Amino acid sequence: MNTRVLVVDDSTVMRQLIGAALSADPELEVVGEAGDPLQAREAIKLLNPDVITLDVEMPNMNGIDFLERIMRLRPMPVVMVSTLTARGTDATLAALELGAVDCIEKPRGSDAEGFRQIAEKVKMAAKARVRQRIKREEPHTTDDFTPNDKIVAIGSSTGGVEALLTMIERLPANCAPTVITQHMPASFTKSFAERLNRASAATVSEARDGDPLVPGRVYVAPGGDFHLEVEGTKHLRCRVTRGAPVSGHCPSVDVLFNSVAKCAKDRSVGVILTGMGRDGANGLLAIRQAGGRTLGQDEATCVVYGMPRAAHELGAVERQLPLERLGPAVRNLTNKEMER
């Protein structure tokens, strides 16, 4: 059975372009379109689509407010289609935090590749598990936390925005040095790092080449054509370089995890979160084989149980845990006080 899609955008031209791109895929069926959230609400009731593509900025009600209502009243897979403006980027990140499955930059003119990505993301969204958002807890104090010599590496993709916020919010201000690769367009990673920074007691930033890995700092891989690695021996630092996709992605979780296994060895803690595909599975296995500790998000709390499943089936995951327990588990593994 084909995936039934509702296209929501205030631009008639954009609705036509997105609809044509989706209809060209034999696995997708565009069952309707709407020019604003009020029309979309009626269309959802009438057509019962499997997936919605949703514009961020629309009349009568913006896409974020409409998404919040969808996720509260009738949770379903939503793919956000956003402009590259700073306002559009911030809104899209808010949408991903609310539970949108994925986002895509709004294609321009004859951007054939951009429209192909819309079809692929919609098909992926149709397989996602959309659930009620986890109520995140207040951040811990640092009274009972002293970092040991561990380095934390986290990899995520689809559903990763909400998952990372859930984890990073709970880090103490003096957390273990943490490096993150989240599959995300280049235009979003800086804003995403800033969003994590506002939510965390630790300092979060987009990684720069040469940044030293020190307690209290979290580094997010730049999106686009860059990979984030860790280099050094006793004193580790970030290495950010241009490169081709690895395991189908740039930045690649495998690239990050393999570098951590090589440099940090048994000082490493690897965590693989929700995402489509298997990027990170081999790298997480390398961390475990190097003597590091490894955790994976469980199926029940993943938006897409792809990357964690691949890692688990490979024997790379030491423990699978619900999302809300991963933060405390990392805290315990990196807490010098727990070694006493």
Image: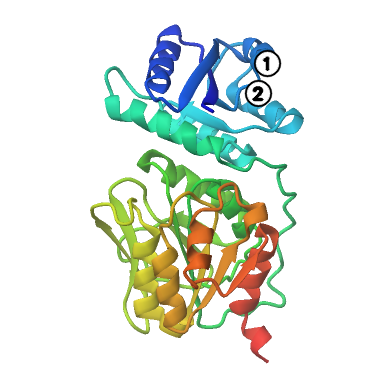
Residue positioned 28% across, 24% down in the render: 111
Residue positioned 57% across, 62% down in the render: 202
Look at the image and tell me in which quarter the C terminus lies: bottom right
At which x and y percent is residue 39?
A: 63, 10
Residue positioned 66% across, 18% down in the render: 44
> As shown in the figure, which amino acid type bears the numbered disc 2?
Phe
Count of numbered badges drawn on the protein = 2
Q: Mark 1 points at which residue?
A: 41
| Vertical side of 132 occupied by 43: above or below | above
At which x and y percent is residue 303?
A: 59, 47
Work out whether residue 8 can be spotted.
no
At which x and y percent is residue 301?
A: 66, 53
Categorize mark 2 by other alpha carbons within 10 Å: few (<14), some (14-19), many (20+). Answer: many
Work out whether residue 261 can be spotted.
yes
Asked which secondary structure carries label 2, the reply is helix
Q: Which mark is residue 319?
A: none
Outermost residue, front direction?
Answer: 1
Q: Residue 66 carries which label?
A: 2
Looking at the picture, tell me which residue is in the foreground, 232 or 142.
Answer: 232
Residue positioned 36% across, 47% down in the render: 223
Looking at the picture, tell me which residue is in the foreground, 167 or 284.
Answer: 284
